[in-house]
Amino acid sequence: MFGCLVAGRLVQAVPQQVAEDKFVFDLPDYENINHVVVFMLGTIPFPEGMGGSVYFCYPDQSGMAVWQLLGFVTNEKPSAIFKISGLKSGKGSQHPFGAMNLPQTPTVAQIGISVELLENLAQQTPVASAAVSSVDSFTEFTQKMLDNFYNFASSFAVTQAQMTPNPSEAFIPANVVLKW
Amino acid sequence: MFGCLVAGRLVQAVPQQVAEDKFVFDLPDYENINHVVVFMLGTIPFPEGMGGSVYFCYPDQSGMAVWQLLGFVTNEKPSAIFKISGLKSGKGSQHPFGAMNLPQTPTVAQIGISVELLENLAQQTPVASAAVSSVDSFTEFTQKMLDNFYNFASSFAVTQAQMTPNPSEAFIPANVVLKW
């Protein structure tokens, strides 16, 4: 389903599947890696309404795994380039790989892909320095999520004539959502 | 043998083979492309002593094909990321696709890969603005070619005791080659 490519090295097309919805690629000698490409192979799309969050995991000085959110791949944006060379001193982010006991070798990092609902992905903020060409993708992705939310919210829209009297229920004018 | 990936889009793994040693990928809607990844699939390596020069080809205002050398892939560096978004106003470079009548559609560009001797690749200079992570690769590649040249040249090295008298023949001290 996924491929991973470290610039300058051979492509990897067989991730390790560590859970039903979680996939991991090993990145040996990660301290000499600048850019990583994560892409869908084009064989199996994400299920409707799902996408993948892409994490970089590396061992900190004490050998503990630090996970950082790089960005996303979706059926609409099935590939992304990430810059990982600036990440090695950054803080970890919340991640869904917590319970997994992945082997931590000092010179091996990982790319983890977690398949999640698109709504969940839209609430996650990747580390800014990871964005290469995914900057545009991410902006577009967020825009698309907002559009989806507007479509979703406006499907419940009523005019005042249609309202049943209920003084305790709050209504948000549709154009407020649109502006936001 | 080769794959091509436009950041944000699906991977292409089947190039059009336009000559025995030349391969082409189409890049539709190329004006919205920032980065292109070119990589070997890992199935078939280059023949011994050969590598691939990677070109970007786009139609100029009059519809003529402009070819620009992006860089190289070799068995030692089987993948590279190139930035093509800054290239569209640049000058064309010498290229080996001259005689080929590739279709020129205004919005479609191409990635061309030409399989050539490593010695030939070492004499070609890619456009500087195309380099992303291939900067290191290219420097290393050049270094490797120089090493190869030193190994090649020093295999002919003789000491003064071994020289047959021939005043018209010039000798280059080995450490001059090494310093260069």
Image (cartoon, coloured by chain):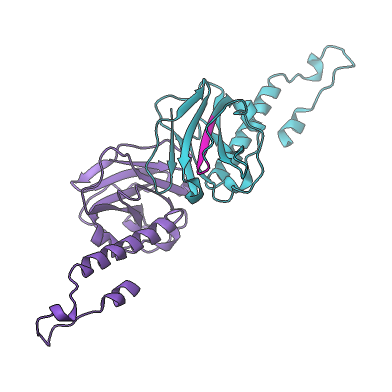
Chain colours: A cyan, B purple
Most extreme residue toward the top is A164
Q: Position of residue A41 (x, y in %)?
A: 41, 31
Q: Is residue A129 above or below residue B138?
A: above
Nearest the eye: B93 or A171: B93
Q: Compared to A26, does B129 lie above or below?
A: below
Query: Within the image, what quadrant is residue B5 found in?
Result: top left
**From the viewer's perspective, is A66 left or right of B142?**
right
Is A111 magenta? The answer is: yes
Seen at 19% across and 77% down, the residue is B159
In magenta, the rendered stretch is A106-113
- Residue A32's x, y, as percent? 48, 51
Rendered location of residue A145, percent (x, y): 63, 31
Prevailing SS of the magenta stretch: strand
- Residue at the spot 50% in from the left edge and 35% down from the top edge: A77
| Residue B145 magenta | no
Compared with A125, B136 (above or below) is below
Front-most of residues A144 and B166: B166
Q: Determine the residue located farthest toward the bottom in the rendered image.
A: B167
- For the residue pair B94 and A172, the one nearer the viewer reads as B94
Position of the N terminus of chain A, as image quadrant, is top left
The quadrant in which the C terminus of chain A is found is top right
Q: Count the marks: how many?
A: 0
Rendered residue at 51%/36% (across/down): A111
Q: Quadrant of residue B10?
A: top left
Where residue A90 sits in the image (x, y, percent)?
Answer: 64, 46
Q: Is residue B151 above or below residue B103?
A: below
